[in-house]
Image (cartoon, rainbow, N blue to C red):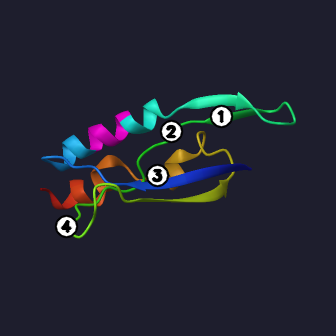
Amino acid sequence: MRTCEERIIHIEAASAEEAYDIAQGKGKSAKFRYKNDEGNPVFFEFVEIKELLCLGSECGSDEYWYDTKTYLLPMEQKHKHIPPKKQLNAIRIGD
């Protein structure tokens, strides 16, 4: 089992496709690794976008949320937890 972080971030974009691309870039650029106090490797890596929503003006540009969850083999089993891009809310309903 691995501990995973889920984040909700706010992205300003002209379309759902643009927001998706920006989110992909942010996720991939946040990747890092290090050894913890016990000498074990820790990997912080982007798995995939879990949801994409079109939000109204009630959301501030600096708001985000995150949670940590434990998954068994998150990268290897991402197809079980991550829907296809076409099923993400903002992509599905259009701009």
Viewer-side label of 3, 4 = 4
Marks 1 and 3, the one that precedes in the sequence: 1
Magenta residue check for 24:
yes
- In the rendered structure, which segment of residues is drawn in magenta? 20-25
Is 85 placed above or below 26 here?
Answer: below
Q: Which residue is mark 3?
A: 82
Residue at horizontal 23 percent and vertical 64 percent from the top: 55
In the picture as drawn, the residue positioned furthest to the bottom comes out as 58
Disc 1 from disc 3: Cα separation: 19 Å
Q: Which residue is mark 4?
A: 56
Marks 4,1: beta carbons within 8 A? no
Identity, as a three-letter code, of the amino acid under mark 1: Phe
Locate residue 32 relative to residue 90 in the image: left or right: right
Disc 3 from disc 4: Cα separation: 24 Å
Is 68 placed above or below 11 here?
Answer: below
Residue at horizontal 41 percent and vertical 53 percent from the top: 83
Residue 94, given in percent of the width and then of the height, sits at 14, 57
Please tell me whether mark 4 sits on a helix, a strand or a loop: loop
Marks 3 and 2, the one that precedes in the sequence: 2
Q: Residues within 10 Å of mark 4 (few under 14, many from 20)?
A: few
Please tell me whether mark 1 sits on a helix, a strand or a loop: strand
Identity, as a three-letter code, of the amino acid under mark 3: Ile
| Depth check, front residue: 74 or 12 | 12
Q: Which residue is mark 2?
A: 46
Locate residue 63 relative to residue 59 in the image: left or right: right
